[in-house]
Image (tube, rainbow, N blue to C red):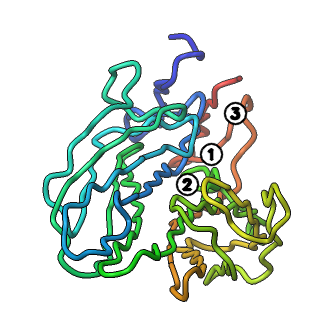
Amino acid sequence: MSLSKELILLTVLVLGIGTKDAYAQDSLSVLYIPLIGITSIPNPATLPNGPGNVTYRYAVKNFIKEVPLTDIKVSDDVCDSVKFVTGDDNRDSRLDYDETWRYSCTTTISQTTESSATATGMANDITATHKANATVIVGSEDPAPQVSIVNATKVTYPLLLSAQGSEVIFTYKVNNPGVVSLSDITVTDDKCQNMSGKLGDTNGNNLLDPHEVWIYSCTINLKHTTISTVTVTAKANGLTATSSDSITINVNIPQPATSPGFPEWKMVSGIIAAFISPCK
């Protein structure tokens, strides 16, 4: 049997006890935590003359190139009939990194309403989830602010660390899917304190303008499995918009292993037995 196969069957000869089968992995496949993002844009964003119909348009993205997402679901707590519109360019029913899947839903809004849309997707037996808030103003022409944040850090699953722990740099993407520029942007992470300044203010006006993306980062020293939640707040027209995102990092601290390619000698009932390790 070739040692290049994914699983190598080793027949371990244990003199005086019998035989058994053991499996060794020839190469480890790298798994990443799946990341999904959604934005929700109401049209119209204001109903100055009273109740009316509003169409919510949703854009769903995959933030990890190596991990296509399956079983995509989108829901909204104020609109029941969310429908897929377009975006699966290669028609493989997987949300790829370079695709944007678009959905829509129409409902009647009778008073100022904040909605919450949720997108979920699956990869590596892990469910990725993200929420987007949107507010429709009734009785005024001033639209509410909208902001979205995603922790877009590419992290292996599980994350292998030394016994002393390791540093991980979180990367956050903040965007403005709305129609009004945002001020007083604040980004905080409940597990990471040294948040960087922003990158991406392309016109230097210190406002998160519609369709701008600001990048933040924060370095954290991880020693165990951690759930991190990042939150962004922003203001416009006397109102505050909020968005948050969480990531769970499963940590493994590897145990010392014997060097491959050399026999490991053990004494079994007074007889020496060799456990042969594969050479790579």
At label 3, which amino acid type do we have?
Answer: Pro
Indicate the amino acid at tag 2: Pro
Residue at image mark 3? 263
Residue marked by disc 2:
158
Residue at the image position 71 percent from the left and 45 percent from the top:
258
Horizontal placement of 210 versus 93: left or right? right
The first of marks 3 and 2 along the sequence is: 2
Depth check: give the residue in front, 81 or 158.
81
Q: Out of 12 and 81, give the one closest to the viewer.
A: 81
- Mark in the foreground, 1 or 3: 3
Q: Residue at x 34, y 60 (%)?
A: 44
In this orientation, which residue lies closer to the viewer: 243 or 218? 243
Distance from Cα at disc 1 to Cα at disc 2: 32 Å
At horizontal 64% and vertical 59% (from top left) the residue drawn is 173
Query: Which callout, 1 or 2, points at the residue further toward the start of the chain?
Result: 2
Q: Position of residue 247 (x, y in %)?
A: 52, 65
In the picture provided, is 48 more to the left or to the right than 176?
A: left
Asked if disc 1 and disc 2 are in contact, CB closer than 8 Å, the reply is: no
Q: Quadrant of residue 198?
A: bottom right
* Residue 99 at x, y percent in the picture: 48, 32
Residue position for label 1:
266
Give the quadrant of residue 78.
bottom left
In the rendered image, the residue lying farthest to the bottom is 238
- In depth, the one of 277 and 133 nearer the eye is 133
* Quadrant of residue 233 within the rendered picture: bottom right
